[in-house]
Image (cartoon, helix red, strand yellow):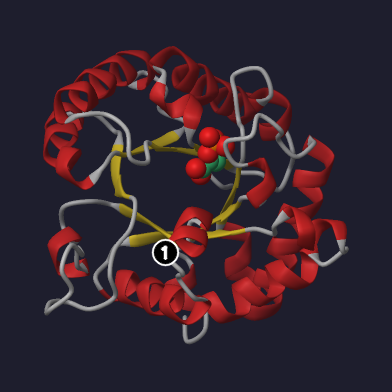
Amino acid sequence: MRQPFIAGNWKMNKTVQEARELAEAIVAGVQALHDVEVALCPPFVALTAVKAVIADTPLKLGAQNMHDQEKGAFTGEISPIMLAGWVDYVIVGHSERRQHFGESDAFINRKVRAALRHSLRPILCIGETLEQNDRGETEAVLAQQLRLGLDGVSSTEAAHLVIAYEPVWAIGTGRPATPADAQQRCAFIRQELCARFGDVADAIRILYGGSVTPSNAPELLRQPDIDGALVGGASLVAQDFIAIVRAASQKQTA
Ligand code: PEP
């Protein structure tokens, strides 16, 4: 049984004070829901403030990015040893990093392996562009991003992974994948994970991400291979994020 997981990716939003207030509002709304794991991924500068807010709650903390090297001349970057023991999760390979910062599958793979080496749980994001979808290449793209992104990861390590299926055309557009399409892609991802890691794949949580809202979350989260959501825009509004977490809680009790 995979515990539903909802992660909020705040991206480059919220000052430290705003982040603290948002975290407090979310904690008030979700801390009684013990059947859903919830992670907040604020900007780096707000990690300390949000960590203090969630200290005595079951909520988890995530970073939005990380370099693969432990230290060195990488101005502006944050390393796995800086995050280890401090956050639980780290988002790796988000499409915005791939698109705006030119991150390759090879670099993303080094980050995944560095995260696992330092006991950080990677949330590996994969997903096709609109053009790739239109050309019927979605499954080939997902298979390749998984194969390259998880190169060198053992079955034992795979148990700590979370995969986020995020069609690039659905992120921040208000145009989510249909529940049926999202389910089909997530089932495909699980099949690929199973071929690679065997039974461990049944325990790996696969999230859907892309314009998730309180109104579409219940149907998306009802799908058997969708174990939760990576939420961008709606995670910035406490009541919306809380409603999505509640929808995940209902999946669990359904
Ligand atoms: C994301 O950034 O991972 C995301 C899914 O964003 P949004 O929910 O805004 O589409």
Q: Is residue 93 left or right of residue 205?
A: left
Does ligand 1 reach within 8 Å of label 1's beta carbon?
A: no
Which residue bears the numbered disc 1? 101
Q: Is residue 66 left or right of residue 49?
A: right
Q: Nearer the viewer, residue 223 or 115?
A: 115
Quarter of the view holding residue 33: top left
Compared with 99, 176 (above or below) is above
Compared with 52, 106 (above or below) is below
Q: Judge whether residue 124 can be spotted in this image.
A: no
> What percent of the width, then of the height, locates residue 235?
43, 28
Q: Is residue 248 left or right of residue 139?
A: left
The residue sitting at 40% across, 72% down in the picture is 112
Query: What amino acid does circle 1 point to?
Result: Phe
Q: Secondary structure at mark 1?
A: loop
Q: Judge whether residue 128 can be spotted in this image.
A: yes
Q: Nearer the viewer, residue 147 or 160?
A: 147
The residue sitting at 33% across, 21% down in the picture is 31
Q: Is residue 99 left or right of residue 219?
A: left
The residue sitting at 34% across, 51% down in the picture is 64
Residue farthest toward the front in the current orientation of the protein: 100
The residue sitting at 74% across, 67% down in the picture is 191
> What percent of the width, then of the height, locates residue 30?
38, 20
> What percent of the width, then of the height, locates residue 72?
11, 79
Compared with 6, 100 (above or below) is below
